[in-house]
Image (cartoon, rainbow, N blue to C red):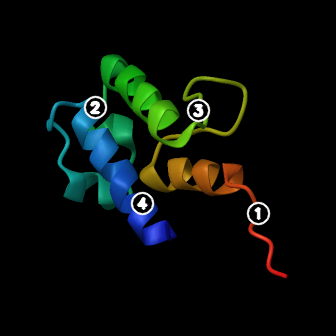
Amino acid sequence: MGNTELRQRVAELVSEATGGGVPVADVLGGGSMIALGLDSLGLLRLVDAIELEYGVEVEFQGTGRRLDTVDDIVAVLVAAQPAEHTC
């Protein structure tokens, strides 16, 4: 999955986590998800969805990198993907 498709899917997950309250197009605009209206319950739903779909643990309120935009999440997911080797 390329970064464009991954970005689209993460935006869809954000929208789903808010019950459609935050439109995909708004998430893809690159702004802060909190400013767009993603609340604490939405964050929990988003974390669960990302962990289920990608097998990657994400933490929005931790000591690590701040995750506030769709691009922040995509960067974490890309970094967590195993490197592909060609022979």
Q: Are marks 2 and 3 in contact (CB under 8 Å)?
A: no
At 62% from the left and 48% from the top, the residue drawn is 76
Q: Are marks 1 and 3 in contact (CB under 8 Å)?
A: no
Q: CA distance from mark 3 to mark 4?
A: 16 Å
Q: Residue lying furthest front in this view?
A: 87
Q: Nearer the viewer, residue 2 or 18?
A: 2
Q: Position of residue 2 (x, y in %)?
A: 50, 70
Query: Hey, what amino acid is under mark 4?
Result: Arg
Mark 1 touches mark 4? (CB < 8 Å): no
Sooner in the amino-acid sequence: mark 2 or mark 4: 4
Q: Is residue 70 above or below residue 5?
A: above
In the rendered picture of this protein, how many numbered marks are placed on residues? 4
Query: Which tag, 3 or 4, sits closer to the chain's start?
Result: 4
Task: Between label 1 and label 3, give the one nearer the viewer.
Answer: 1
User: Picture coordinates of residue 73 (x, y %)?
Assistant: 52, 47
Q: CA distance from mark 2 to mark 4?
A: 15 Å
Gap in angstroms between the C-alphas marked 2 and 3:
15 Å
- Mark 4 surroundings within 10 Å by alpha-carbon count, few (fewer than 14), some (14 through 19), many (20 or more): many
Of marks 1 and 4, the one in the foreground: 1
Residue corresponding to mark 1: 83
- Marks 2 and 4 in Cβ contact (< 8 Å): no
Outermost residue to the top: 41
Q: Earlier in the sequence, mark 1 or mark 2?
A: 2
Residue 2, above or below 80: below
- Please name whichever residue, 67 or 53, is drawn nearer the observer in this view of the structure: 53
CA gap between label 1 and label 4 equals: 19 Å
* Residue with the mark numbered 3: 58
Tag 2 residue: 17
Q: Are marks 1 and 2 in contact (CB under 8 Å)?
A: no
| Label 4 sits on residue | 7
- Mark 2 burial class by Cα count in 10 Å: few <14, some 14-19, many 20+: many
- Residue 72 in the image, given as x and y percentages of width and height: 54, 50
